[in-house]
Image: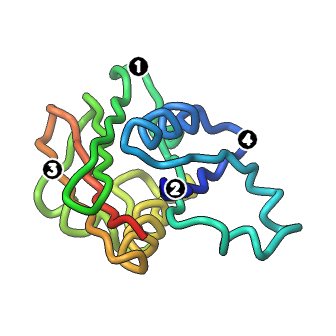
Amino acid sequence: MKPKALVLQAHGTNRDLDVMNALTLAGADPIGVPLNNLRSRRTLWQDFQLLVVPGGFSYADALGPVKITAEPAEGAARLQIGDLGYGMDPETIRKATYPFFSAKPAGRKRGMGLAYAARFIQLNRGALAIESHPEHGTTVTITLPYA
């Protein structure tokens, strides 16, 4: 049986369809659900083995595409999200999953996305790895075990 994946959709996001395609390739059964629908059906969370919160819209700019790939791994699904952006130095990578940390200027509502993602991944016995080099982009690898 394929694991069911809940892909949250919100106004302004543009990566949910890419993520759903990647999850399908990895062998999951993704279902897109608008964020507002979760408020009315609290038990909906219990119907899924994976929770995916696409965040590609946060840094959309003219630096190039965000590439999302998925592949099966030993008893898990491996998702990779990469960009050709500014990249991060080692200190920024170290702090990237800290709540409220942002390399961006204050006041831009940044700093919780990776913290939330890292916690969801941890709660689901997964792993998150960040590989990045300044001026050469970033690749985030998420490995989540099948339920």
Asked if the residues shown at circle 4 and circle 3 are in contact, with their CB atoms under 8 angstroms apart, the answer is no
Residue 75's place in the image compared with 59, above or below, is below
Image mark for residue 62: 1
Which residue was labeled with disc 3? Answer: 131
| Residue type beneath disc 1 | Ala
Q: CA distance from mark 2 to mark 3?
A: 20 Å
Q: Is residue 85 above or below residue 65?
A: below
Which residue is drawn at the image coordinates 35% and 73% (left, top)?
Answer: 98
Gap in angstroms between the C-alphas marked 4 and 3: 29 Å
Q: Secondary structure at mark 2?
A: strand
For marks 1 and 3 on the same chain, the one whose residue lies earlier in the sequence? 1
Residue 112, percent from left and from top: 49, 66
State the CA–CA distance, disc 1 to disc 3: 21 Å
Q: Residue 119, located in which quarter of the rendered image?
A: bottom left
Dot 2 amino acid type: Val
The disc, 4 or 3, on the residue closer to the chain's N-terminal end is: 4
Q: Is residue 42 left or right of residue 112?
A: right
Q: To which quarter of the image does residue 115 belong? A: bottom left
- Residue beneath the point at 70% across and 46% down: 10
Q: Are marks 1 and 4 in contact (CB under 8 Å)?
A: no
Instruction: Look at mark 2 in the image and give the residue it sits on.
Output: 52
Q: Earlier in the sequence, mark 4 or mark 2?
A: 4
Give the class, few, some or many, for how many residues have Cα within 10 Å of label 4's Cα (few <14, many ≥20).
few
State the mark number for residue 11: 4
Q: Secondary structure at mark 3?
A: strand
Mark 2, other Cα within 10 Å: few <14 / some 14–19 / many ≥20: some
Residue 63 picture quarter:
top left
| Residue 59: x %, y % from top left | 45, 38
Q: Amino acid at mark 3?
A: Glu
